């Protein structure tokens, strides 16, 4: 059920799988709502008349994160296509923006045209009923929307912006989706589709033998067309590459809040500690919910999920994060709603810690937080608070 890579900022969470496909987009809350629902948003490459999605067995993919940053660092190599892709993904530290950089390295001894395709398979607000996908000629983007949830997709290379696009019907009767349209290297250019829909865009780069070119792709999320258009303009004005660099710098600075004496601990253990801080941050909503697990693969078993906040589990994580120096991240957890104000209910157990940090009087108090919310974590009668009640 694991998601191999996660990036987020407390308002938006994006999960990627082992093929570097987006599988979950949570917005505007971490854990609620999921606008992809586990379906793969594919990435594929056309080179010299041959097309391969990144789940093709010919790809060898290495997944990692950039050092001390909530930015991915993945490498995909396909010897049959003679190409290597270097990929970085991140969510803006403040805005609801997902950014991706793909460096295309031509490993062959001849100049090649590469066409990189990105597939958007959204189920807005958790259902694919009533979605719309359309080309927006005012800024040359593709956007999806339903009610007050809007997602705009754009990209560019040194050869310009979106060169191809199409929208269409997916998973209805015989229609598989626009991702099938991409497999001949050319999208048909259908400008709008409604209902159960998806879309695809194509970006081109001609790369000399032994050389490399960079392609950028990004998604903006907002509650109106005006908002996603504003965010798209922000990316174009400030350049997506520079924004990805600032995201990495932000997280490096964020980690400096925690500077314990590691003593003679191995470097790999220190690296794991810092990575854990970043992952916990990605799963914590800025309004307080510390979510158990944001992964939709479990839906295939009983149509349930783990995008809940259990008070006991959240309390344990809040205690650990506070001890690590991240009070500002977990302080909202104690006031999720008036009826669950843990500071009021457990005023005697929550004490100022070192340097003014919040902490529970003992680890056992974390368990009593769950009991105060009337139940156990497991069982038919379990009482737990769903995200943002």
Image (cartoon, rainbow, N blue to C red):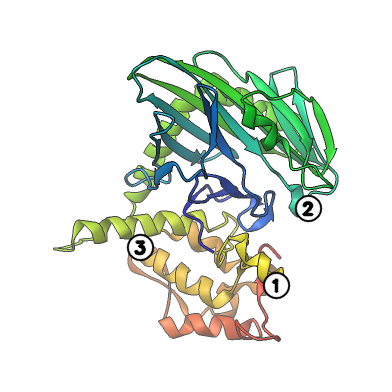
Closer to the chain start, of discs 1 and 2, is: 2
Closer to the chain start, of discs 2 and 3, is: 2
Left or right: where 133 falls relative to 51: right
Viewer can see residue 173: yes
Quarter of the image holding residue 188? top right
Q: Are marks 1 and 2 in contact (CB under 8 Å)?
A: no
Quarter of the image holding residue 77? top left
Closer to the camera in the image, 232 or 82: 82
Residue designated by label 3: 324
Which quadrant of the rendered structure holds the C terminus?
bottom right
The residues bearing labels 2 and 3 have C-alpha atoms spaced at a distance of 39 Å
Q: Is residue 9 above or below residue 31?
A: above
Rendered residue at 33%/18% (across/down): 109
Q: Secondary structure at mark 3?
A: loop
Circle 2 packing at 10 Å, graded few (<14), some (14-19), many (20+), is some
Rendered residue at 50%/41% (across/down): 93
Residue designated by label 2: 127
Disc ID at residue 252: none
Task: Tell us which disc is closer to us: 1 or 2.
Answer: 1
Quarter of the image holding residue 76? top left
Q: Secondary structure at mark 1?
A: helix
Closer to the chain start, of discs 3 and 1, is: 1
Rendered residue at 78%/35% (across/down): 168
Closer to the camera in the image, 190 or 380: 190
Task: Tell us which disc is closer to us: 2 or 3.
Answer: 2
Residue 179 point in image, percent of width and height: 67, 36
Q: Are marks 3 and 1 in contact (CB under 8 Å)?
A: no
Closer to the camera in the image, 380 or 223: 380
The residues bearing labels 1 and 2 have C-alpha atoms spaced at a distance of 17 Å
Q: Is residue 67 above or below residue 165?
A: below
Residue 294 point in image, percent of width and height: 58, 60
Residue designated by label 1: 302
């Amino acid at each position: 059920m694991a998601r191999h890579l996660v990036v987020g900022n407390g308002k938006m969470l994006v999960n990627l799988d082992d093929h570097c496909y987006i599988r979950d987009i949570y917005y505007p809350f971490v854990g609620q709502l999921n606008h992809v629902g586990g379906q793969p948003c594919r990435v594929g490459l056309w080179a010299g008349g041959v097309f391969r999605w990144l789940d093709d067995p010919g790809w060898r993919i290495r997944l990692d994160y950039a050092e001390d940053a909530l930015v991915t660092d993945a490498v995909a190599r396909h010897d049959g296509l003679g190409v290597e892709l270097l990929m970085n993904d991140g969510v803006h530290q403040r805005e609801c923006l997902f950014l991706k950089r793909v460096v295309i390295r031509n490993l062959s001894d001849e100049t090649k045209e590469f066409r990189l395709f990105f597939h958007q398979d959204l189920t807005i607000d958790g259902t694919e009923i009533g979605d719309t996908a359309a080309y927006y000629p005012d800024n040359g983007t593709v956007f999806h929307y339903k009610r007050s949830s809007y997602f705009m997709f754009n990209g560019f290379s040194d050869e310009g912006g979106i060169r191809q696009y199409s929208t269409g019907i997916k998973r209805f009767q015989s229609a598989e989706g626009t991702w099938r349209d991409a497999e001949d290297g050319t999208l048909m250019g259908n400008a709008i589709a409604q209902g159960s829909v998806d879309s695809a865009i194509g970006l081109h780069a001609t790369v000399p033998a032994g050389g490399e070119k960079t392609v950028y792709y990004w998604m903006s999320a907002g509650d109106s067309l005006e908002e996603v258009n504003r965010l798209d303009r922000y990316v174009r004005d400030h350049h997506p590459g520079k924004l990805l660099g600032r995201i990495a710098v932000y997280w490096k600075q964020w980690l400096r809040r925690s500077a314990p004496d590691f003593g003679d601990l191995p470097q790999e253990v220190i690296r794991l500690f810092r990575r854990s801080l970043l992952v916990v941050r990605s799963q914590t909503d800025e309004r307080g919910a510390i979510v158990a697990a944001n992964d939709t693969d479990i839906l295939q078993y009983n149509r349930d999920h783990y995008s809940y906040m259990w008070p006991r589990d959240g309390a344990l994580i809040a205690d650990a994060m506070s001890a690590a120096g991240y009070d500002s991240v977990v302080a909202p957890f104690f006031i999720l709603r008036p009826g669950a104000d843990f500071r009021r209910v457990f005023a005697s157990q929550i004490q100022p810690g070192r340097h003014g940090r919040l902490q529970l009087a003992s680890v056992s108090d974390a368990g009593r937080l769950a009991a105060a919310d009337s139940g156990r974590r497991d069982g038919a009668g379990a009482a737990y608070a769903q995200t943002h009640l």
